[in-house]
Amino acid sequence: MERSRKEKIVNDLHDALESANMVVVTHNNGLTVAEATELRRSMRDAGASFKVTKNRLALRALDGTPYEALRELFSGPTAVTTSEDPVAAAKAAIDYAKKNEKLVVIGGAMGATVLDAAGVKQLASLPSLDALRSTLIGLIQAPATKVAGVLQAPAGQLARVFSAYGDTGTDG
């Protein structure tokens, strides 16, 4: 591989690591082209990216990023999964690893927090950022709806009393 191509690979990976909120390092032992394509598609659908790189180039790309502590994980046939959503990369990697034992999650990091494989698995069990947002919005809207219902109920009851009183035709 020529030097300019290596530099581009290192720079692209460095930029991906700089903008990522989550990085998952995996070993991909013997994935076929079809399996790798399926994996990349599932990662892309989850909002994550999956890159197989040479360890030497990945180690250079780690320099100056919050993920330098992951250096020890880069041995053997490694790949890097990155995402802006802290849960997306972990969830996509763990979900695929459950289906195909050729992909093994060996660790990762969320910012400066280094995670082992069990930590990545726990993170993957959390709901995604979008799911958390929708739950939060639902929680915020629910009390407002209940308050509006409670406030409308006495007014409705009062209107019914006045209506009933008016229908009786009694002067009081």
Image (cartoon, rainbow, N blue to C red):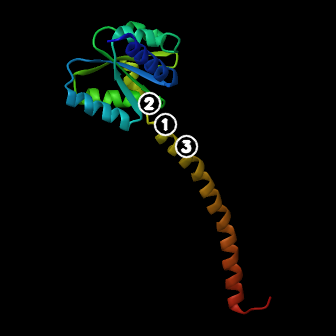
Q: Residue furthest bottom?
A: 169
Tell me the quarter of the image containing the C terminus: bottom right
- Which residue is at 48% across, 40% downward? 130
List the residue tagged with mark 1.
Answer: 129
Contact flag, marks 1 and 2 (Cβ < 8 Å): yes
Question: Disc 1 versus disc 2: distance between alpha carbons?
Answer: 7 Å
Q: Earlier in the sequence, mark 1 or mark 2?
A: 2
Front residue of this view, candidates 81 and 2: 2
* Callout 3 secondary element: helix
Residue 74 higher or lower than 137, as above or below: above
* Callout 1 secondary element: helix
Q: Position of residue 78 (x, y in %)?
A: 31, 15
Q: Residue furthest right?
A: 172
**172 displayed left or right of 36:** right
Contact flag, marks 3 and 2 (Cβ < 8 Å): no
- Mark in the foreground, 1 or 3: 1
- On the question of residue 168 being in view, the answer is yes
- On the question of residue 109 being in view, the answer is no
List the residue tagged with mark 3.
Answer: 136
Question: Disc 3 versus disc 2: distance between alpha carbons?
Answer: 17 Å
- Which residue is at 32% across, 35% downward? 42
Q: Earlier in the sequence, mark 1 or mark 3?
A: 1
Question: Disc 1 versus disc 3: distance between alpha carbons?
Answer: 10 Å
Q: Position of residue 40 (x, y in %)?
A: 31, 31
Tell me the quarter of the image containing the N terminus: top left
Residue 128 higher or lower than 20, as above or below: below
**43 displayed left or right of 138:** left
Q: The disc labelled 2 sits on which kind of residue?
A: Val
Q: Residues within 10 Å of mark 1 (few under 14, many from 20)?
A: some
Q: Earlier in the sequence, mark 3 or mark 2?
A: 2
Q: The disc labelled 3 sits on which kind of residue?
A: Leu
Number of the label disc, if any, that sits on residue 87? 2
